[in-house]
Image (spheres, rainbow, N blue to C red):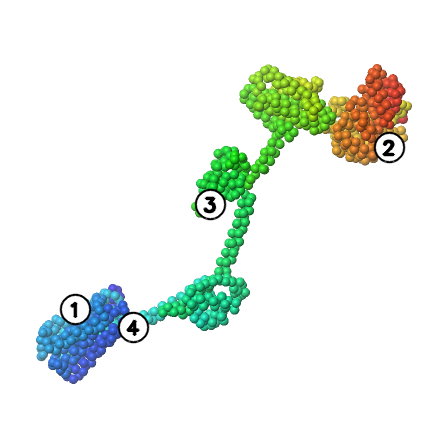
Amino acid sequence: MRRNHPSLLWATGSVLLVLMAVWAMPRFNLFTEGSGELLVLHLIIELFSVFVALLVVVMAWNVFTDENRSTSRTLIFGFSVVAGLDLMHAVSYPGMPDLLTPSSTPKAIFFWFLARAFDLLTFWLLALGVRLPGQRWHALAVAVGVLAVVFAWGTWCLDWFPTTYVPGEGATTLNGQIDLLLLAGYWAAAWVFVRSTHSLRNRYLAWACFLMGLAQLLLNGFADTGDVLLFFGHVLKIAAFALIFKGTFWLGLRAPYNLLQQSEQQLRSKQTELDTLLSRIPAGLARIDVAGRYVYVNQRLAQRLGQPVEHIVGRPFGEVIRPERNATVGQHLSLALSGQPTGYEGQTYLVNGEPNHATVWMAPEHDSAGQVVGVIAVVLDVTEQRRLQQDLAHSMHEIAELKAALDAHAIVAITNAQGIITSVNDKFCEISQYRRDEVLGQSHRIINSGHHSEAFFRDLWQTISSGNVWTGEICNRAKNGSLYWVHTTIVPFVGKDGLAEQYIAIRADITKRKQAEQDAQRMALHDALTDLPNRRLMAERVSQAIAHAVRDKHVSALLLLDLDHFKEVNDTLGHAQGDELLRAVANRLRASVRQTDTVARLGGDEFVVLLTDIAPDMAAATAAASDWAEKMRAQLARPYELHGEPVIATPSVGVVLFGSATDDPEEMLKQADMALYKAKAGGRNQVCFFDPSLQAEVNSRTSLLRDLRAAVELDQLRLLYQPVVDRARRVLGVEALVRWQHPERGLVSPAAFIPLAEQSGIILQIGEWVLDTACAQLSAWADDPVRKAWTIAVNVCARQFNEATFVATVEAALARAGANPAHLRLEITESMLQSDLDSTITKMRQLNDRGVRFSLDDFGTGYSSLSYLKLLPLDQFKIDKSFVDDILNNRKDLAVAKTILGLASNLGLGVVAEGVESAAQYELLATYGCEAFQGYLFCKPVPVEALPRQSSI
Ligand SMILES: Nc1nc2c(ncn2[C@@H]2O[C@H](COP(=O)(O)OP(=O)(O)OP(=O)(O)O)[C@@H](O)[C@H]2O)c(=O)[nH]1
């Protein structure tokens, strides 16, 4: 509406101006009625209207587009009628030559009114958008019909039309009323045009209607045909027709032209858009004509071909592409030109020499008649795609290999989120012994061994269902009921919602390792020889037994058993037989206890029996334990049969009872050991109970041992020397004897500390010290004229001699002191010769080769086999003091001494008699050939300073 305001203002302004002009203007006749000028002018004006109306018709006939056809029918009909009627009006104007009937003002007015009625009708049809049916020629034919009727009416039947003009009086009232009616009709039409679409045409037509109305206003009430108002009215009509022409011309000629321009513009922009699109799409495009020439290539293809677009277009493909592609491209082009779409993929090289993969499609292009006019080719670079495909294939291959490797080595199962097995590999079936169809659809419960607690599986599910990896060891049960262990890793596959969708379980068979672990664990807690629990397990069992005993208020007993002289079995029958005996002992012990009791081997020939809950109180327990212990002692004391030979191995048994919370396993074992010690000391093959008085004895042993350990470092050991003399009492050498000078205990006798030193191993340290000291002494005597020929005899105990490093230790001592090995004499005992004789001989020979000499100490007290004596590099025998002591009264002792002397003589060895305390002993021994003597008769063991300074005593 706002856009119409200026028009409305103009219209209102024009109306007011015209009305004011008409009002103010003096009325006069411009032309004399019927004058020639008037006629010519009127004719020109009307012919102009006719011309314009005909132009409109011609334009509507030819130019209007299809959608305006209906409008064009209205225009053709309306303006054909108007042109005809205006022509009739002009021709019938008074003064014009007569046409069939005389020209007259009423006749001219009749045709005028009808002409206006039809142009008003046409305006309304256009304003209301009424579309006339039929074809253009229908509209023209109806118009011609109407004209014929109206012409006939105006020519011959004018009387039928009301009088609108009276000559001499002018226009009638009716004339004025018709004018006003027309005016109203025009302006109403103008208003409808304004209110309808705001097209340019409608605006022109609105103005035309308005001017036509205005013309009718001027024509209203004109006096005669020469009236100035009549003239102005016609002028306005010309103006109105000019506007009609303008409006219809715009619609009919300008608008299509504009449309054309617009279309061209759109076409151009579409073309640009298309070009941009075609150059941007990730494919090369080409149109090739039937002659194989490029009609179009997009930028991408041109780049690919390495030439600018303008160089390619118009040239045959063979000149543009690489020569080696000619055959393939030509072949497919021919196929496409034959009307068959085709495509291929191939490798080529780009201008920069890079290899390139492309897929090419060729499709025939047809014209409207269906003839093939060319080919559209699409070239798609698939290098990256191929590379990805290759990578993918490679990855797939790798995954397949990985899977194969996994399947070959791991047990794999996949389950859904609910734990239902959806896939298993062959290994799974192999180890579980289930067929694949037996496990698919089942949960892992099918292989549950019952070994693990519910909490174990709860924890597992909690871990994996929250998206975490679970790793652990699981014991499963195979179909045949056997158990197998797997190291398991369960990996959840988490979906987009963060929840596990499926699980993959990868397992490794660790049954063997588990078995080994269990074996190792068993070995750690059991004795390999007898398969009895060992010391560690026994300690645990004792702790448990203490707890039970306290809880149940029962007394239990711990028995410590040690075979008597087992060492002799080893020594005489061999270690293997010793083992056999230990196993037999273990079996007898096992067989003689209840299931709830425990038999353990502590080591060597020591066994422990734990008898739980034997009685409710100590008195009863003592009796019960005594019975048990006696029973066991008797069982073990029965002869054994080792390789057909009967062997006796009695046990000594130490018993300790327990039942209070303060009992400590280690302490109890010590107490049992004390009782055992007592049994051994009491003559063996007997049972002794632990008695607190034993404790004191043990304590004193312990403190002695503690002091002994420190003795060497604190320099508390002393070496005494006892001379060895010949028959003329000339000193041949000395025997070194160790003593312990304790600050509080005083001089401790060797009998008190040497066994303890041997048991505890301190003897090694002491032995080394003795060797060092003796060698140093030899070295010190090297320049002494009296003592330089003396030998020093050093006692070597079994433990020391059996050390693998014994030879090296002696050599090192000699080397350190720079002593002459020939002056060192090592005294070994018979018992040392009973085990591993070969090694003994080797060691002795090694040292003997260096010059060291050997004496066999205490000869006659042991079980020396005479046969091997000759194998040993011995230098002398020593007759034990026990034979010398009673040699004067005891014939047997004398016989032994004589035998030794005889044997030595036969073997070419020397003999030293020990413990010679009286001259009678000395003389008797000398009588039987003894050449060397040692004893209080000559000299007690004395410090080096107290040794005689002269060569004889
Ligand atoms: N055959 C065999 N002998 C062993 C084994 N372990 C230790 N021995 C030997 O067992 C012997 C234990 O000796 P002891 O108990 O100290 O002494 P014994 O000869 O039994 O004398 P008493 O116990 O004092 O009556 C030593 O000779 C060890 O070498 C073993 O596993 N097998």
Vertically, is 16 above or below 617?
below
Disc on the earlier residue, 3 or 4: 4
The one of 5 and 494 positioned closer to us in this rendering: 494
Q: What residue type is labelled 4?
A: Arg
Determine if residue 207 is in view: no
Mark 2 crowdedness (10 Å alpha carbons): few <14, some 14-19, many ≥20: some
Identify the residue under disc 4: 254
Q: Please give the name of the residue rendered at 64% of the width and 29% of the height, measured from the top-left corner.
A: 527
Q: Please give the name of the residue rendered at 57% of the width and 25% of the height, measured from the top-left corner.
A: 544
Q: Which residue lies furthest to the bottom in this view?
A: 36
Identify the residue under disc 2: 782
Where is the C terminus found, in terms of image quarters?
top right
* Circle 3 or circle 1, nearest the eye: 3
Q: Position of residue 49 (x, y in %)?
A: 21, 77
Q: Which amino acid does label 3 sit on?
A: Val
Identify the residue under disc 3: 494
> Mark 3 near ligand 1 (CB under 8 Å)?
no
Q: Which amino acid does label 1 sit on?
A: Ala
Label 4: which secondary element: helix
Mark 1 crowdedness (10 Å alpha carbons): few <14, some 14-19, many ≥20: some
Where is the N terminus found, in terms of image quarters?
bottom left
Contact? badges 2 and 1 (CB < 8 Å)? no
